[in-house]
Image: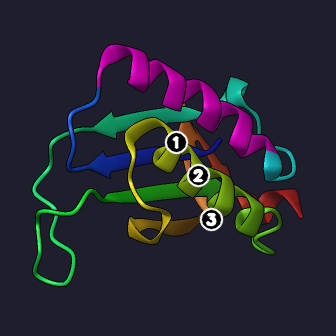
Amino acid sequence: MPFILAHVNVPVSREQETEIKTRMGQAIELVPGKNENTLLFGIGEIEHLYLRGDGSQKMAYIEASIFGNEDHEGFDAFAAAAADIFRQVLGIPTENVYIRFDDIRAWSVGGSFIDRNRYR
């Protein structure tokens, strides 16, 4: 299950949020074995973000936590697509879109513990 949490320093309308959610659901399919049906997505708007000491630029910090892909297949294509989505929908320059990938080794869903080492 992938979890993507986006932090942006601009207002986001309900329509923009829906468009980003939908397009990120499509972008996650660039990572083998992932799709919108398993994606948990969230977005925080108007956060106080500073880049090089400047808080006046539009920017995004995205946390992409992905389980079971230790070879990071598709991460490069996903990163490019995600940056473009935030550029197109919110006008954030791609050079101001930062993505942190977390390689999830263990996960719990519905109270069930899942360790990727059990599935090798």
- Residue located beneath label 2 in the image: 84
- Looking at the rendered structure, the kind of residue marked 2 is Asp
Position above or below: 91 against 22: below
Residue under the image location 19 percent in, 84 percent down? 52
Quick one: SS at disc 1? helix
- Residue located beneath label 1 in the image: 88
- Looking at the rendered structure, the kind of residue marked 3 is Arg
Distance between the alpha carbons at the discs numbered 1 and 3: 33 Å
State whether residue 69 appears in this view.
no
| Left or right: 38 as drawn, with respect to 82 | right
Q: Does the magenta stretch include residue 68?
A: no
Callout 1 touching callout 2 (CB < 8 Å): yes
Q: Which of the two marks, 2 or 3, is nearer to us in this view?
A: 2
Sequence-first disc among 2 and 3:
2
| Highlighted magenta segment, given as a residue range | 13-29
Residue under the image location 70 percent in, 56 percent down? 78
Q: Where is residue 5 in the image (x, y as percent from the top left)?
A: 41, 46
How many dots with numbers?
3
Q: Where is residue 56 in the image (x, y as percent from the top left)?
A: 12, 62
Looking at the rendered image, the quarter that the C terminus falls into is: bottom right
Q: Which mark is residue 105?
A: 3
Packing grade of label 2 (10 A; few <14, some 14-19, many >=20) is some
Q: Residue 46 carries which label?
A: none
Q: Does the magenta stretch include residue 20?
A: yes
Dominant secondary-structure state across the stretch colored magenta = helix
Quarter of the image for residue 38 reads: top right
